[in-house]
Amino acid sequence: MLTVRKSQDRGYADHGWLQSFHSFSFAGYYDPQHMGFGNLRVINEDRIAPGTGFGTHGHRDMEIISYVLSGELAHKDSMGNVKGIPPGDVQRMSAGTGVMHSEFNHAEGQTTHFLQIWIEPNVRGIAPGYEQTGFSAAEKRGALRLVASPDGALGSVTIHADASLYAGLFDGAETATLPLKTGRKGYVHVVRGQVQANGECLRTGDAAMLVDEPFVTLSSGQDAEVLVFDLEG
């Protein structure tokens, strides 16, 4: 079964300095029908105004991935990491027993646009951890490039969760298929552009939730950037 959720059906919050679309219940947005999907708990599409950001705050026992689309995200945490995250990089922070961090947009006249993704861990109480890796557009062109996985396969960042995340760029005749094992769930999020997922047309911000499907095939892209999650059932 494949279920489409349109971009406009997401939650939305405008804080002035932050504009955020919530794929699942988060903060002031609550939808009991969309509390998460499998072990995927949060996808927030955030736009941070210049010179602003998230002040220091804490997390624990969550795998947090940042995927920057434009601008740059300045990250600082209690583990001693002070990093800039540009488009093309994937950042993983394992909150574990507890971590404090901040995220800012220090650029003048440029909005930072990124996805904040939370995945429920399959182990709790671990030491906090940080990892950041860049993936070129060429690696994602017409393919599903593994960018996060439980074992760090193929140079992906390592998450402490039973989930894998793939990123792809599709245009024209380019196509790719990801097999889904029995009992697994698939989740497709269109970052930008338009693409077909198993024949269903998805546009920017749309998502497809797959249950009891043997695969997900992406095709007929129009300047599309897509994230695909392989999740526990």
Image: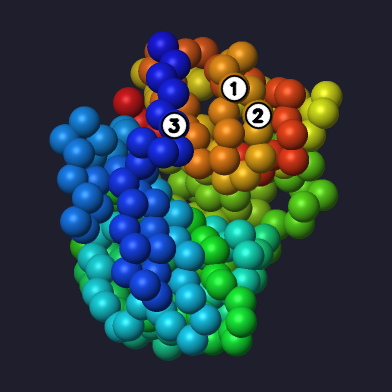
Identify the image quadrant of residue 36: top left
- Cα separation, mark 2 vs mark 3, equals 13 Å
Q: Amino acid at mark 1?
A: Cys
Tags 3 and 1 in contact by the CB under 8 Å rule?
no
Which badge, 2 or 3, is on the more N-terminal residue?
Answer: 3
Question: Which x, y percent locates residue 154?
Answer: 66, 48
Q: Nearer the viewer, mark 2 or mark 3?
A: 3
Crowd rating for badge 3 (residues with CA inside 10 Å; few <14, some 14–19, many 20+): some
Amino acid residing under circle 2: Val
**What is the x, y in percent for residue 194?**
65, 33
Can residue 187 be seen by looking at this rendering? no
| Residue 186, placed above or below residue 19 | above
Label 2, on which residue? 195
* Residue to which mark 3 is pinned: 6
Q: Is residue 177 above or below residue 62?
A: above
- Badges 1 and 2: C-beta atoms under 8 Å apart? yes
